[in-house]
Image (cartoon, rainbow, N blue to C red):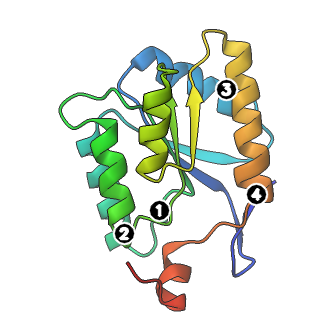
Amino acid sequence: MTVETIENEVRAARLLLVEDNYGDVILMMRAFQDIETPIHVEVATSAEEALVMLRLQNEFPRRDLPDLILLDLNLPKISGWDLLHTLKQDVTLMHIPVIVLSSSGSTQDVINSYNLHANGYVVKPSNPGILREIAGSIEQFWFKTAVMARIADVKRVGATA
């Protein structure tokens, strides 16, 4: 299976994982290897790196922006909160769904994430089997059910900030 865009163009799904913990990166990569949908996963280990990657991809039309961002909140220097805020204020990036993937289950963290326009909040499980289930749920909804928009579609339709 692949992602179908507004223009009905079929292509591999793209995911940006913003995570500074190497162990969590490995676990997430393994979880997404087990799903049916072909997926290209890129990893940024900091908010700064993620912004550079996203802005570079936006400058070169042949490099697609990710369909989905999985974001850890506890990042060095610039926090996940600040990155989420920046993404949702940027007219060329705000359309990308962001799912917060955090070790915190704090009600305040959940509320703060949604107040910053996160599209979902998932508490990192301690069991890798549950992580595979989460990857499968993300695949089912975001890559098989939801209609995804690419930046070319957003620009063509005339999205405003």
The answer to whether residue 58 of the structure is visible from this angle is: yes
- Residue 142 lies, in percent from the top left, at 70, 52
How far apart are the two marked residues, 3 and 1, measured between alpha carbons?
22 Å
* Residue that label 3 marks: 31
**Residue that numbered label 4 is attached to:** 2
Residue 95 vs residue 43, the one in the foreground = 95
Asked whether the residues under the numbered discs 2 and 1 touch, taking CB atoms below 8 Å apart as contact, a structural biologist would say yes
Q: Nearer the viewer, residue 37 or 21?
A: 21
Return the residue at label 1: 65
Check disc 2 and give the amino acid type: Asn
Give the class, few, some or many, for how many residues have Cα within 10 Å of label 3's Cα (few <14, many ≥20): some
Q: Which residue is mark 2?
A: 58
Q: Residue at x 72, y 53 (%)?
A: 143
Q: Position of residue 58 (x, y in %)?
A: 37, 69
Few, some or many residues within 10 Å of mark 2 (<14, 14–19, 20+): some
Q: Earlier in the sequence, mark 4 or mark 1?
A: 4
Tell me if label 3 and label 4 are in contact, CB under 8 Å: no
Q: Residue at x 26, y 53 (%)?
A: 52
* Side of 49 relative to 11 (left or right): left
